Image: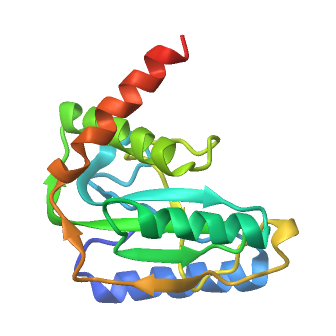
Amino acid sequence: SFWSKVGDKRTLTNALNRGTALNREGGYGLYFAPCLRRDKQGKAEAAAMLPAMWVDLDCDDDAARRAAALAKLHAFDLPPSAIIDSGGGLHAYWLLSESVALDESSRKQAAGILRGLFSALGGDPQYVKSVASVMRLVGSVNTKPERGGVILTVVELHPARRYPLTDFAWLESQSQVEQIDSL
């Protein structure tokens, strides 16, 4: 794991350069944490700031599934700020208008919203929906053997699309209803 403080460009550049070399030459996956961390830990308790919401939509290299996933994202009430092609599917991100400081309560709320977002869009059921989550980095090689060394690319980028966290509140309640239904 390589860590860098926000704004420390030299350390971040060094970490990205080392990670990129390991990714391209050594076959290591290159991931980032969507939530900023307070400590150099991957635990949910170390997540300090939530700048975006995200979803991972698996398509298993199936063109029809990829087209359907993209159509779902385009039809969603809150159009994503960014869509990334991961080689095996799509990653979508919704930038928040203001980053949310995370405490125990807001971490649980964010996890509930992530579960609801994944459920609403048909996200990867195996993905852990938590502020501790990591995602593959754009420009890196997807190191899964079945992906054939594909590089993650930006499909769409709309940085002006930013949302208050409250716009996603309905997803948290949907997540809780689905959990009750599955009991």
Q: Is residue 45 visible?
A: no
Residue 57 relative to residue 41: left or right: right
Of residues 16 and 183, the one nearer the viewer is: 183
Q: How is the image coloured?
A: rainbow
Q: How many marks?
A: 0
Q: Is residue 83 visible?
A: yes
Kindly give the residue lying farthest to the top in the view shown: 183
Above or below 139: residue 175? above
Above or below 145: residue 77? above
Q: What's the residue at 19%, 52% (across, down)? A: 167
Above or below 43: residue 48? below
Q: Quadrant of residue 60?
A: bottom right
Q: What's the residue at 75%, 82% (across, down)? A: 150
Residue 72 relative to residue 148: left or right: left
Above or below 82: residue 115? above
In the picture, the quarter occupied by the C terminus is: top right
Of residues 173 and 71, the one nearer the viewer is: 71
The image shows residue 139 at horizontal and vertical percentages of 58, 86
Q: Quadrant of residue 143?
A: bottom right
Q: What's the residue at 44%, 39% (across, down)? A: 115
The image shows residue 69 at horizontal and vertical percentages of 59, 64
Q: What's the residue at 30%, 49% (across, down)? A: 47
Q: Quadrant of residue 12?
A: bottom left
Residue 92 relative to residue 88: left or right: left
Of residues 178 and 165, the one nearer the viewer is: 178
Residue 72 relative to residue 94: left or right: right
The image shows residue 87 at horizontal and vertical percentages of 71, 74
